[in-house]
DNA sequence: CAATATGCTACGGTTCTCGTATATTACGGC
DNA sequence: GCCGTAATATACGAGAACCGTAGCATATTG
């Protein structure tokens, strides 16, 4: 499997791949740290902020769907939503199509606070992006999306037994 | 500030930047989900796994340094390390240079289980990387590193009030 | 050498988590 | 339409985690 004699070209490529993987791990670590710090400012547990992000990103969502996306126990999700609702981050409406279900939606006003706290990171990323050509940015976005998909697939594989 | 009349070129660029930012958020969400699923398999809280990753990445580390990197309270870190130590993930050695301090190091054997659980994601990322030229990979790694640095800076800004 | 700062942990009150039970509603077969 | 089963959300409670505070040991500073 492992080539016995690897030329400089092979070595360079493998090294580059390793650095991409390291970059991904490091990025993930920094993003979770940032989330934790932002959450601390708002009095939110990091899992609460994770859920709030998911609600913001994926529109109105049922608690069960949220639990699946976040990888949380259903009862835990109830607790998370209780806290988010009590603090005015989200609202629970009955699902008109299913009278057992609720739809959780994010409230606009407090969301501004969130953006404020992420403003530093946001502008830094924009500054970084400014160094790239349009086509490069599109390639970057494509890579990020594909990697995120890979993460989702890996998660599902681990979830289903 | 905001341009009144934006041409197609401007629009394309802004769209590309937005997609990079969205990709980053989505990637972060998927990576934390993956971490949660992996942790669930191992009986670890997600914060425990975060810490274990940091210990693996940044060599032997004092509990205080770990707490800072992870954004956790010192007392919380003690609890995390107790659990990790009890389950055989890490060991605490006294720091020879400072007799108050400890150095936490990861143990090799159980680490193999970790790699196993991340194997799916790992191979997917390698498959993705295979589609890129060497120079592209290096550019990607550079982008990831710069973004991670931006995250660290943003976190520090939020931490130091 | 005193005074202060630092590293880590013990303790305890509050909060969170998650398995189970329960109430309500959907759905499928007949 | 009816009944059994599945699904959605929450209540409850035991166990665990979090984190402010206090405490001890050691460093560092003046």
Image: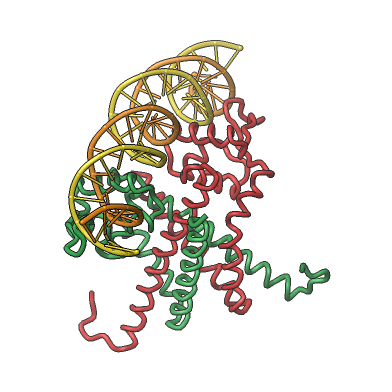
Chain colours: A red, B green, C orange, D yellow
- In percent of width and height, residue B105 lies at 22, 59
Whether residue A31 can be seen here: yes
| Residue C24 vs residue A67, the one in the foreground | A67
User: Which residue is at 34% across, 48% downward?
Assistant: B74
| Residue A52 vs residue B122, the one in the foreground | A52
- Residue at the bottom extreme? A8
Is B58 located above or below residue A152 in the figure? below
| Residue B95 vs residue B19, the one in the foreground | B95
Q: Is residue A96 left or right of residue B71?
A: right
- In percent of width and height, residue A20 lies at 41, 72
Task: Give the tally of numbered discs.
Answer: 0
User: Which residue is at 48% across, 45% downward?
Assistant: A69
User: Which residue is at 38% across, 47% downward?
Assistant: B73
User: Which residue is at 32% across, 48% downward?
Assistant: B77
Q: Is residue B26 left or right of residue A22?
A: right
Q: Is residue B110 left or right of residue A86?
A: left
Q: Is residue A136 left or right of residue B83?
A: right
- Residue at the right extreme? B5
Splitting the image into 4 quarters, where does residue A134 fall? bottom right
Is C15 located above or below residue A48 in the figure? above
Whether residue B57 can be seen here: no
Splitting the image into 4 quarters, where does residue B121 fall? bottom left
Is B161 located above or below residue A130 in the figure? above
- In percent of width and height, residue B20 lies at 58, 66
């Amino acid at each position: 499997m492992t080539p016995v004699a690897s030329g400089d070209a092979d070595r360079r490529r493998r090294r580059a791949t390793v650095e991409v993987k390291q970059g991904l791990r490091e990025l993930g670590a920094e993003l979770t740290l940032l989330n934790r710090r932002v959450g601390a400012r708002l009095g939110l547990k990091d899992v609460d902020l994770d859920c709030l992000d998911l609600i913001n990103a994926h529109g109105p969502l049922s608690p069960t769907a949220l639990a699946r996306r976040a990888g949380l126990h259903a009862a835990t999700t109830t607790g998370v939503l209780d806290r988010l609702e009590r603090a005015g981050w989200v609202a629970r409406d009955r699902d008109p199509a299913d009278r057992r279900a609720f739809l959780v939606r994010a409230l606009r006003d407090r969301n501004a606070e969130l953006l404020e706290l992420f403003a530093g990171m946001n502008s830094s990323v924009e500054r970084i992006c400014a160094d790239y050509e349009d086509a490069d940015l599109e390639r970057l976005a494509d890579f990020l999306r594909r990697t995120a998909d890979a993460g989702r697939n890996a998660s599902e594989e681990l979830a289903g037994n």
